[in-house]
Image (cartoon, grey):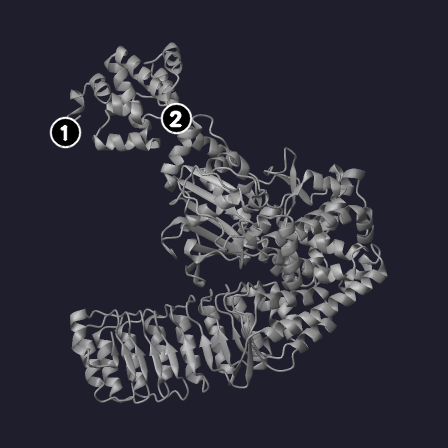
Amino acid sequence: MESNKSQREISYIRFVTEHRIELVKRIKNIDWILDSLIQNKQFTVEDKELVECNLTPCAKVRRLLDIVHSKGEEASKCLVHVLFQGCTTNTDLQSWFNEICFQPSVHVLSKLVIVSCPVDQYKEKLRCKLLEDSKYMTSYPLREEILLDENFTDTVLEASTEYNQHQCNVSNLMELFTEEGTLNTAGEIILITGDAGIGKSVLLQKLQNMWATEQLCTDIKFFFQFRCRMFSFFQIENHGSLKDLLFRYNCHPDKDVEGVYQYIIQNPSTVMFSFDGFDELVLDFHTGNIPNIVCPYQEAQPLCLLINLLQGHLLKGSKKILSTRTGTEVPRRFIKKSFTLKGFSQEKLLKYLQKSFKDKHTQTLIQSQLEANPHLYSLCSIPLFCWIIFKCYEQFYSTTDTYGLPGHQITLTDIYLLMVEVFINRCLLMESKHRMTRSQVETFLAKKEVLLNFGRLALLGMQRASFVFSHDEIVSANISEADLQLGFLRPVKRYSGCGGQATYEFLHLTIQSFFAALFLILDNGVNSDDFIFFLHKEKYSVRFEKICLCHGSASEITEVKCKTANEYFNFTALFVSGLLSKKNLLLLKQLTSPKSLKKKNTILFSHLTEHIHVHLKSLPRSRIGEDVKVQALPQFVWLMKCVYETQSIKVAQLAASQIRANFLKLTYCNIHSADCSALSAVLRLMQRPLSIELDNNNINDHGVKELQPILGKLKTLRLSVNQITDTGVTILVQELIKYRIIQKLGLYRNQITDTGAKDLAIMIECCPDFTSLWFGKNMLTSDGGIALGKAIQKSHAILFVGMWGNEIRDAGVISFAKALKNHPSLQTLSLAATGTSSEGGVQLAEALCQNTSLKTLWLIQNDLGDEAAASFAEMLKVNKTLEILWLTENKITIKGATQLSHALLENTTLKEICLRDNKISTEEAQVFKDVKRILF
């Protein structure tokens, strides 16, 4: 058919006859075509039966075309338009219609009723299943149904604009799938990282629900969800194809399975995957032992299919969302975008409180108690811990009409002990049918054997790095159906290798770690060697590898991965430390042998002291003036947390004595606000003044409050990229002014406004030895800039000020210009990206004519023009101190550059002027090729 032929000239019966061969070749499935023809009253049920009685697909299509031809023009017209309307799910038909430039008749098309083809039917089936699966919160249930839409509260989600650097908050989940912020265009993985209990699984559930309700990525036809832990459950001999993996563990097409799969492999851009918990894979694929699979029909071990999906060898072009624990290694070349979950902000925590407790009086009571206990408030920033704490509040109120949690020195172990007590009491209440008041000891004694059984099962899982338990393992652990009603275990989908029986998992992996710790302490059969084994990370790694190899954990394909196991080992060691604290010994003595407790307590304290010493001794050190600087690692933070859980001043003093450095660098250590209590508990016992770098963590205002005990000891404090607001700055300033020994303060890329800037201005004036302020990328306006400029003018010690990215405009910059006049000490000043124009630039240049201290001035990314350039040129004829002047990304033309070049003839002290990315062409820049001090 010619492209310029009008629809009125088309003979549809001739069209079908002429293109018969192409139609037979390209039509893959006819069920939906037959249904559509019947609904449009062009076919009868008898016609359909005549077509279906043929044996081969091609024979069926030929018979279909024969019957259509016999029925005439109207039936042919209906067939062609049905094919055209449904061709979006058949790429062969779609490309053919495009080749022949076929255009449908709008009049005819409007009358057609099309039954969805198998691809569309499967898409709708997948949507319905995902909607059903994601409708209720499933991460931490207590045998209750909680609607996702009514209870989901988003957490702080940060996007990396560069790999592990310069992060910004995500305000809309659609930002996960845009091209902005792409780290690697060749990668296909959208990576979501976060610590234990931070809400990764719930976030993926929310994304699944949004897709199922058509609020997200409407161009995606298929969304397949997987939990990574299932891939560790397959045996070596379990093999299958990608088709088996997709349809067996999501849902199966009702019709034309092969046709649906063909569409998926031919249109990978219409497919999205979510893989939850990559850190829960026991096996490591980085060794290169996994074979590349590019054929979508090739059968392989499911783990092998997973890795090839993530690497883009299978279904290249599909979207993949991968969640994992912070610190898990995912090769950078596979990552397209990277995001980090940071937990609840103060605003989101309040929102979650309101959703959890509808009564305003109750909300006020709980908020008041949280605010009175900063560490408890900090724990609530982690959604899992917050859920546990709120469940405890809820249970207290329902049973005692009061709210009460342990006192100020509450620890994470206390919270988990309280959770166990609440769960047991809830179960006992259901059994007794009436309220009873029990002491903590009575509650635990009532279910002691059951708790030991759960602990034995948890420990078994940790020994094998297994997080899913078969029905036989549940029975072997003597856990009955009644015990399951406690709520610590939940049933999960069946995994291959478990037969037809149900499988179970702990509500959360940290709960599994807690029960493992409880068993290690309560069971008298745990000897000293076994106890030490679970406290020593390095020994654990070696022994764990042997255990996995003995169990044949895919050693032919991959090597054993121990990092995940070490993460839960860390939690187990932390809970052991907390359970053996003095305040919990009163409970434990009623549950196990006091002699055994004493022995394990001695082992624990000895281990902590030795491990801190060995760990700190191995850390890289450097000397900065009189300070000894140590680059600490995340494991150091875990050790401090274990010390804090003991609540022992003696252990804290021993730990402090082992830190033979007075400058700690703890950047990128995943430190949360609650962890600051642990750091403070040890560092406050050190005798000498300290310097500490805490950039790029998740400390926020609550963490600043927890750092109060050590703020008076600090000479240097860096808290950049930590979600600190004006509230945190107020706490900082109040403490720092009391002791006035602070010299350097870093608050780059936080959420501080003019209010916080004015507080900092007071601190600068009050602290006589203060030399350096990193304060870029906050939320300042001119008012904040003016306040800081005035404070710097009064300071006689300040050496460095960084204001990059604060919109302080000309008014703020002029305040800094006034500060520069005759300033005795300031050597480096960054006013880059501050929104200043030539007006501010002229004022700065004039001020520098009366300055003999400043050596470096950055004015990158502003609106400086030739007028400012001329003023700087005049300044250079006078100023003989300035060495570096950066004017990159401004509006200077060849005229301004020429004036600066001439000024250099009279100035021999300036080392470089950078004029890159101004309004100077490459040809114009050639004029200055011999002027080495001007950089283009």
Residue positioned 28% across, 19% down in the render: 78
Q: Residue at x 59, y 57 (%)?
A: 562
Q: Identify residue for label 1.
A: 4
Q: Is 578 placed above or below 488 here? A: below
Depth order, front residue of 319/704 = 319
The residue pinned by badge 2 equals: 116
Compared with 40, 798 (above or below) is: below
Height in image: 36 above or below 3?
A: above
Answer yes or no: do the residues labelled 1 and 2 have beta carbons within 8 Å? no
Q: What residue do we see at 26% from left, 86% from top?
A: 876
Q: Position of residue 826 (x, y in %)?
A: 40, 84
Considering every residue shown, the one lying at the far front of the view is: 556
Residue 430 got which mark? none
Q: Quadrant of the C terminus?
A: bottom left
Left/right placement of residue 586 relative to residue 96 reads right
Residue type at tag 2: Ser
